[in-house]
Image (cartoon, grey):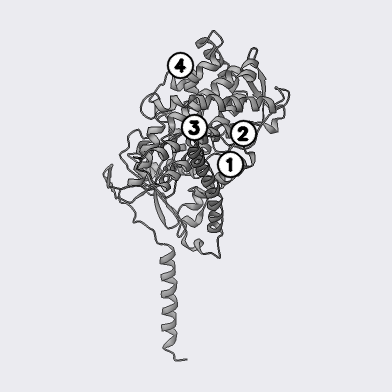
Amino acid sequence: MDAQSFPIGGFLILASIFFLLNYLNRTDKPKIKGIPEIPGYPFIGNLLQLGNEHAKNASALAKKHGPVLTPTLLSPVFQVRLGNRVQNNICKFVEERSVVSSSQGFTIGTSPWDESCKRRRKAAATALNRPAVQSYMPIIDHESTISIRQLVHESKNGDIDVDPILPFQQFALNTSLTLNYGERVHDRELLKEIFHVERVISNLRSTSNNWQDYLPLLRLAIWSNKNREAEEYRMRRDEYMNLLLESLKDRIAKGKDSPCISGNVLKDPEAKLNEAELQSIGLTMVSAGLDTVPGNLIMGLAFLSSAEGQTIQERAHREIVKAYPNGDAWEKVVEEEKVDYVTAFVKEVLRFFTVIPISLPRVSISDIDYQGATIPAGTNFYMNAYAADYDSSFFESPHKFDPERYLAPSIHASSGTPHYGYGAGSRMCAGSHLANRELFVAFSRIIVSMRLSEATDPRERPILDALECNAHKTGLTTDPKPFKLRLKVRDGAHKWLSDS
């Protein structure tokens, strides 16, 4: 070999290595001047620092590096690097937002902010506004009664400890299904399939579960089977979503349908939604029926059953009895919401447990002027809802569960956005009114009809930390770890549980 070939060969090898390193270390967006950046590592950025608990660790990183990066101003917005992607993480409670954003997906909440998404969101918002939700109260009445009866039945009328998770997953899901398709699902196997598939898909959508979203090398088929798994569960989801819609169309054709969201669209000759958009609304209702309401409801029951929850539980019971001294609370809480303490309890559950700790990513569609920096259109944002809901500059003693903060707040909790349990801004959950009524009715009926306490076996008692209670720490939403509680039906409550 010619002597001159050695330096040429070496140069080519070095150039190849340099090219490979540069390719693997590139970022999808340039870093933004003027926005603090959390120090990270080559190739992986901040992925190792964020670990399996992005919400908690991002908040800790912001507190650790904030005084160094911005000594005169603790910015609530920080840049982090997830592999080859630059993201902006919002880690503090910020009341005003002017960011219009978009994301990838098929539900309304995970769709790009385009004309189709606007049409779907408008249809959903109309169907889920306050007056509309009041017309759905017979459904919430029916489903809450069934689930509470099931809880009492499975406890053998209070003789044994009981796991409340399944009854109230069914409550939330069947409420959403009845609203959208006009009929609840009675097939237990189908319910189990929906629960399982939606949980797996929720984990796949999580911002912290899939490193291949951020590291291009891991997207190669030899490294990951995530794409195959996603395809499998997409097909399984398509199967039951098509079944639900076709069943509705069949009932409409036979004149046996009940009023519902999708039915109203199908029968409206002026409806501007195509079938794909209609399916998106249905998917949103199914997904929402398992994402937020059951997690909050189950963890709220977990807290009420705990030793520290006894005082709050008895206060809530006194307030309900005070509001309805004639013993008609079971019926009245469906018709109206006038027990302020229970409303405050619902808000505190939504804040304390923050069942979607890190929001789905959003992309700004216009430039944003922020504290002297210009954040360009096309910038990715993650809202750290957990960090915002535990922001000590906004909430006094944020790690204390305290409904009183929403009755006589010492700072801002009664005005503006009370918590980030439903997100905020233009992409805030369109079903928040419905979810609030579901939670208010369920909690009120449970509290007025029974007393909850800790399970006999300490090993079966719930974990009450908002992040540690999650069975899948990298999941998008909280999937409560199994636990049990003990219940005792209150005097006079059997009539509601047997005759409703």
Inter-mark Cα distance, 3 to 2: 29 Å
Question: Which badge, 2 or 4, comes first in the chain's sequence?
Answer: 2
Image marks 4 and 3: residues in contact by CB distance under 8 Å: no
* Residue 5 to residue 175: above or below: below
Q: Residue at x 44, y 49 (%)?
A: 105
Disc 1 designates what residue?
195
Image marks 2 and 1: residues in contact by CB distance under 8 Å: no
Question: Which badge, 2 or 1, comes first in the chain's sequence?
Answer: 2
Amino acid on which disc 1 is placed: Phe
* SS class, disc 1: helix
Amino acid on which disc 2 is placed: Ile
Question: Which badge, 4 or 3, comes first in the chain's sequence?
Answer: 3
The disc placed on residue 258 is 3
Amino acid on which disc 3 is placed: Ser
Inter-mark Cα distance, 4 to 3: 30 Å
Q: Quadrant of residue 454?
A: top right
Q: Can residue 168 be seen in this view?
A: yes
Q: Where is residue 39 in the image (x, y as percent from the top left)?
A: 42, 51
Disc 4 designates what residue?
338
Disc 2 designates what residue?
165
Inter-mark Cα distance, 2 to 1: 12 Å
Image marks 1 and 4: residues in contact by CB distance under 8 Å: no
Image marks 3 and 1: residues in contact by CB distance under 8 Å: no
Given residues 424 and 217, the one toward you in this image is 424
